[in-house]
Image (tube, coloured by chain):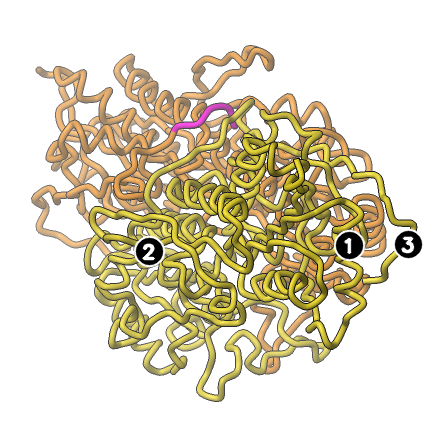
Chain colours: A orange, B yellow
Amino acid sequence: MASRKNAFYAQSGGVTAVINASACGVIETARKHRDRIGKVYAGRNGIIGALTEDLIDTGKESAQNIAALRHTPGGAFGSCRYRLKGLEDNRAQYQRLIDVFRAHDIGYFFYNGGGDSADTCLKVSQLSAKLGYPIQAIHVPKTVDNDLPVTDCCPGFGSVAKYVAVSIKEAALDVASMAKTSTKVFVMEVMGRHAGWIAAAAGLAQAQKGDAPHIILFPEIVFHQPVFLNKVKASVDRCGYCVIVVSEGVRDANGGFLAEAGTRDAFGHAQLGGVAPFIANMVKENLKYKYHWAVADYLQRSARHIASKLDVVQSYAVGKAAVELALKGHNAVMPTIVRKSDKPYQWTIGVARLADVANREKPLPRDFITTDGFGITAKARRYLAPLIQGEDYPPYKNGMPQYVVLKNAAVPKKLNTGFKI
Amino acid sequence: MASRKNAFYAQSGGVTAVINASACGVIETARKHRDRIGKVYAGRNGIIGALTEDLIDTGKESAQNIAALRHTPGGAFGSCRYRLKGLEDNRAQYQRLIDVFRAHDIGYFFYNGGGDSADTCLKVSQLSAKLGYPIQAIHVPKTVDNDLPVTDCCPGFGSVAKYVAVSIKEAALDVASMAKTSTKVFVMEVMGRHAGWIAAAAGLAQAQKGDAPHIILFPEIVFHQPVFLNKVKASVDRCGYCVIVVSEGVRDANGGFLAEAGTRDAFGHAQLGGVAPFIANMVKENLKYKYHWAVADYLQRSARHIASKLDVVQSYAVGKAAVELALKGHNAVMPTIVRKSDKPYQWTIGVARLADVANREKPLPRDFITTDGFGITAKARRYLAPLIQGEDYPPYKNGMPQYVVLKNAAVPKKLNTGFKI
């Protein structure tokens, strides 16, 4: 029993439709190794829960409720946007973590997040070497942005990709019906402030050339209004309507976000809307077409009802693998998705050093975008198509999905000191 | 064979996730009565197809493709926003319809739409009596707005209701996760310019008191900013966040749409965005909470992937019933949904006279809205809950729903005259 330690698990950054599937993988796997892992404590609201000694005892949750995390969106323990400073800049913060971890006999640290979170996890992994507190820190990858390096894809991305592709396919059928006498242009705004991975996924709605979406606007491609408007007109002339997907991160030639480009309301406030209404209005002003627009926002990343089955399976798998890596003695690593082939799609779990992951973004390759900048290439399609495979419906009751809300019982505090975050 | 006539079917107004299920019901039922109904011709883009003699021969479609209409959103034959004038105002229009109907031996007219379309259908039903052309006109109800009178509910509404309830439940889990350090207020805009039926459906996401959505803004309730802001603050104080559903039709004390209330961009144009960003910004300006907002727009009414099974069944049933009513000799009627009990929910098909349906809107009853104006009552819940029951997933291939695109082969024209619409 000497080697038995408790584990700390926390969710970090923007949550996804499947981050709880990773939590499920961590907790269910830990429960199978009670000889090595005692309690699994979750941080309430991420790392803030560790700093404030606000821990959740996941041992109080039934096996059934933990299993239900697999089909429940959002972050079951609460997440946070909070980045640890460097060890040199805020030593007290790290000392506090050690105090809390020591008080609760925590030897394993599982951190479920994206690039910023990998950096936090890397810093925690150095507590052993730098401050003498023995801990193994394993990062569990998660981000709808799909921009973590080393791993082939990021858990969370496949589900938002599927939501976006399905939604634009459906909306396009609607627009096609209405185009004769009404709406001719439809604009849907999707997430991805820095990279066009999500926008690219919309291209999967195209079953054949000429299908919607007719135009995708990527953050990677500078927006030129005349070229764009010509493309819209050509689409309407050809098939009667035009379906456009625009990334929130699209920029103009000066590098400014299009959504912030100069429009002000009557009080001088920056424009309230997103880039979708901006683009839709531009089309209306110049081409006179009737338009509709949508901004999916959180709907896209919480849409567990249309999650990718592969994404759910991989999210669970990285949670499970994180625990197994810890049990094998690893520190400062992250399980990855390794693609072995595109078609048939085959994958396995690999491992990356956190030093190779933290603070690096994987951009959308230029050769995933067509030469004209408005669509995706066959190469992009080969990469993206497997990630939306399979459906994994949550259970329903009375017409509504049965998502679990955990008890989230607090672990009694052992330190009698507060900590200001 | 003397009584054998061809049928005309057309889709009208805004389309839905399930209007094609009604088309499926009409065509499959007609195909079972070939002794009485010869061809089923669909109007390309609704009634415009009749006026321009642009007919689609649905007989060219395989049984498999017609069956696939049941799970395909949008309007498979094209819809239109086009209202026939009164007989006195545009006699040429009606004479043209008669010419086209006579040329193609059409004796049955099935029109699939909402209130305006019921008016068109009623006018066509009068061709026999007023202009001596024998035709039976049957209206097939459809509208996401749920505002047709007589019928208990409108095919199309249940699916948008389910989409809205599921989406806000999922987004609320996301917001709850982020509220500690990030987004505290989430606003989702839904359709319903004249009535709050769709907004009310969002209330079904509440499993128990205090659950999201915390605030619903109805077109029926005059918006008062101070009362609203107090309610937002109370919600954030109590549970850490606030989830708001706002109908596009919300109005201020002067009767103006909130979304159009005074904001202009730098060029003096009316504000680009919808009411969701307007509300979100109001919260930010006054209460300083970080916000996110979404506008589902067409996504909500085309989301066949999360359609209500009951809605699909009822949509098919009204299509089938329309043909059966025609075969029984009816004219100027509409099949209705008759509710026999709430719990267990039981229903049957009834019949309404079009004169009782056309140009009348069924408002959301005041006693469906709580006294404070921000939520739904138990009575509303009893009415709404059955309508989202059951899931009816489309088939998927390679991760995408397999929606059918018909051949839509044109019927050779028999008239050598054009008609300007």
In percent of the image, x 92 and y 50: which residue is there?
A: B416
Residue ranking furthest to the bottom: B254
Tag 2 residue: B179
State the image coordinates of residue A325 (x, y, percent, origin top left).
32, 17
Extreme residue in the front direction: B2
The quadrant in which residue A312 appears is top left
Circle nearer the viewer, 1 or 3: 3
Res. A102 visible in picture: yes
Q: Which mark is residue A253?
A: 1
Mark 3, chain letter? B
How far across and how far down the image is residue B171, in percent? 38, 50
Question: According to the image, label 3 marks what residue?
Answer: B417
| Helix, strand or loop under label 1 | loop
Calculate the distance from the C-alpha at mark 1 to the C-alpha at mark 3: 52 Å
Q: Nearer the viewer, residue A75 or B151?
A: B151
Closer to us: mark 2 or mark 1? 2
